[in-house]
Image (tube, grey):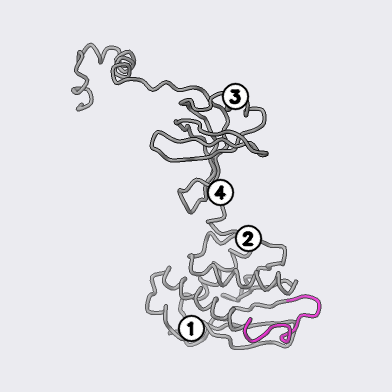
Amino acid sequence: MKNEASILKVRFKGEGISPGSFTAKELGELLIDLQKGMASIAEHFGDKDWVDSEKILSLVNVEDKSNGLSFASYYPAADSGYDLMIKSANNKNLYGLPRGAFDGMKAISKLTKKKRCSAELSFEQDSENSYAVITPDDNLITPEEVYMRDTKDFYGEIIRVGGVQPKVWFRTFGGTLQDGIISKEIAPKVASKLYKTVKMKAEIKWLASSSEIEEIKILDVEEFEIQSNTDLFDDLRDSLGDYSEKYGSDLKGLIND
């Protein structure tokens, strides 16, 4: 254990802000969230013995200037943990923090919005001061709030088209019912394929933290003819060329190769 504690300072500043601007409950909840966050960082660093330690983080001082809070930790890697928090505040996102540390930073941000004030985070390491500011207009982005985009082809039967904001409902070959956004320009073309088997090119959007598709936007549609096995093998032979001659009508040899 370190002989001296590492100090993280959080100062809320703004018009009329003082220690009396915060209830004991608000400060208590902030301390708990920051304690959990530091414990999560300790676990992230592989220091599991510190996860349940009472000395992981504690509130040691409240300054009667705006509202300055000093949090002390005897955790050996506390400075590295503070550094992650400062960088997250400066970057306005929480990507660099373990998930368990999100709530502490969100609690600070929530108080700035509620009290319409800013929050200054700082700590001193090797005579150098690390510093960040969170304003009430800042939104700290978490990984699950980041969307990914790609294109994908959907195959199935269109079963409904319509709506003030045009949409198409379709059933995939796998039996899943899906819906997608369509523009007014492409809506007539999609509607002409009602109850037909189609291939639809779409732009999809999903959360970075999940593989579940959040939005489907149809870009184009065309009728799709389901081929028989014979037609598929004929197309495969045409594509294979010389390989087809080598293996004759038996394509199993090629597959096994």
Residue at 43% x, 83% y is: 53
Packing grade of label 1 (10 A; few <14, some 14-19, many >=20) is many
Q: Position of residue 218 (x, y in %)?
A: 56, 33
Discs 4, 1 touching: Cβ within 8 Å: no
- Write down the residue under mark 3: 189
Q: Which mark is drawn over residue 147?
A: 4
Residue at 39% x, 74% y is: 47
Secondary element at tag 4: strand
Q: Earlier in the sequence, mark 4 or mark 1?
A: 1
Secondary element at tag 3: helix
Q: Position of residue 85 (x, y in %)?
A: 57, 68
Report the amino acid beneath label 1: Tyr
Q: Earlier in the sequence, mark 3 or mark 1?
A: 1
Q: Whole-Å distance between the Cαs marked 3 and 4?
A: 29 Å
Q: Position of residue 74 (x, y in %)?
A: 48, 83
- Write down the residue under mark 1: 74
Q: Whole-Å distance between the Cαs marked 2 and 4?
A: 16 Å
Report the amino acid beneath label 4: Tyr
Q: Whole-Å distance between the Cαs marked 3 and 2?
A: 43 Å
Per the rendered image, the range of residues in magenta is 13-26
Task: Tell me which corner region of the image, top left, top right, bottom left or bottom right, holds residue 145.
Answer: bottom right
105 up-or-down from 154: above or below: below
Q: Earlier in the sequence, mark 1 or mark 2?
A: 1
